[in-house]
Image (tube, rainbow, N blue to C red):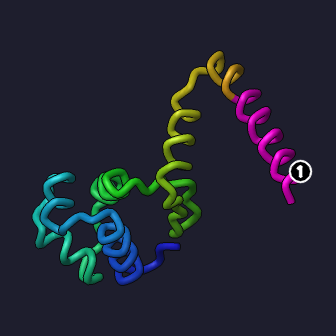
Amino acid sequence: MFYDKQVIGKKIKEWRVQKGLSQEKLSEAIGVTDKNISRIERGIQYPKAENLMKILDVLDIMVIGLDSCTLYVQNNPLRNKGLNIINSATDEELELIVPNIDFYIKNYKKSRKKFR
């Protein structure tokens, strides 16, 4: 997904606007200047890796993979919340969570088929 400064900057701006944040608010949240955010969004500079992770966190964008020079992200706050819960669960907690998720999804799909 990310290969050059312009693409990164354009996506960050798109996600920031969707979230309703100004450059100033985003910059305050991650500890950089609003000019730094502007330069990133205009494709003049790459964000530092640590700042990119902070930006993605503030904008509720979850990194789901990294392959070579490509960063894959998920822009779905509800899915991100669920994945964060699962990722932070212990093995014991996962033994309880996963069967319940499976149960609810299967029953949801069955109930939708009945009403079609």
111 left or right of 69?
right
> Against 62, is 1 above or below?
below
The C terminus lies in quadrant? bottom right
> Against 63, is 6 above or below?
below
What residue is disc 1 on? 114
> Against 91, is 24 above or below?
below
Q: Residue at x 32, y 63 (%)?
A: 19
45 vs 20, nearest the viewer: 20
Rendered location of residue 92, percent (x, y): 65, 16
Secondary structure that dominates the magenta span:
helix
76 left or right of 7?
right
Rendered location of residue 58, percent (x, y): 31, 53
72 left or right of 111?
left
Magenta span includes 46: no
Mark 1 Cα-neighbour bin, 10 Å: few <14, some 14–19, many ≥20: few
Magenta span includes 104: yes
116 vs 80, nearest the viewer: 116
46 left or right of 101?
left
Q: Residue at x 10, y 64 (%)?
A: 33
Amino acid type, mark 1: Lys
Residue at the front extreme, as displayed = 115
Rendered location of residue 76, percent (x, y): 51, 57
Q: Element at badge 1?
A: helix
Splitting the image into 4 quarters, where does residue 82 fall? top right
Splitting the image into 4 quarters, where does residue 107 fall? top right
Q: Residue at x 47, y 52 (%)?
A: 77
46 vs 64, nearest the viewer: 64
Q: Which residues are magenta?
A: 98-116
Q: Residue at x 56, y 66 (%)?
A: 68
Q: How many numbered circles are shown? A: 1
